[in-house]
Image: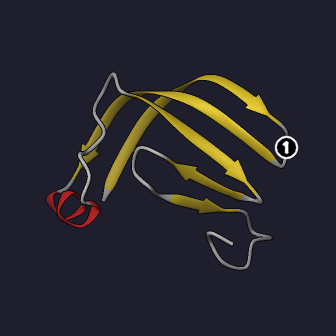
Amino acid sequence: MITLNFRILAVHGTHAKAAARIGVTSARVDKEWITEAHRPPPRAGQIGTLVLEDGVVTDELTGATFCAATVDKCGA
């Protein structure tokens, strides 16, 4: 599991397709996530992007996706 706290620094785009630049303020990562993710864990001070497209938000730092209730399958 991973827990990120961040501040939204800037947003651009439309309601359907947008990107938000974020600054990580804290990150708590367990060993299992590090083993399964095959990427370095985010850290405080790191800048990343959240991308919204077709009701799916993707965190480019972690690869995690979050879906709107209207989306049948994440990544759709």
Does dot 1 land on a helix, a strand or a loop?
loop
In depth, the one of 2 and 54 nearer the eye is 54
The residue that label 1 is drawn on is: 15
Q: Amino acid at mark 1?
A: His
Q: Position of residue 57 (x, y in %)?
A: 63, 53
In depth, the one of 5 and 17 nearer the eye is 17
Residue 51 sits in which quadrant? top right
User: For the point 24% across and 59% down, which residue is it?
Assistant: 38
Q: Position of residue 26 (x, y in %)?
A: 32, 31
User: Is 30 left, or right, of 21 in this rendering?
Assistant: left
Q: Position of residue 20 (x, y in %)?
A: 63, 33
- Density class for disc 1 (Cα within 10 Å; few <14, some 14-19, many ≥20) is few
- Which of the image's four quarters has the N terminus? bottom left
User: Is 14 left, or right, of 52 in this rendering?
Assistant: right
* Visual colour scheme: secondary structure
User: Is 50 left, or right, of 48 in this rendering?
Assistant: right
Q: Position of residue 50 (x, y in %)?
A: 58, 41
Q: Is residue 15 above or below residue 48?
A: below
User: For the point 70% across and 27% down, which residue is it?
Assistant: 11
User: For the point 25% across and 45% down, which residue is it?
Assistant: 41
Residue 21 sits in which quadrant? top right
User: Is 42 left, or right, of 47 in this rendering?
Assistant: left
Residue found at the very far right of the displayed protein: 15
- Which of the image's four quarters has the C terminus? bottom right
Residue 68 sits in which quadrant? bottom right
User: For the point 23% across and 46% down, which residue is it?
Assistant: 40
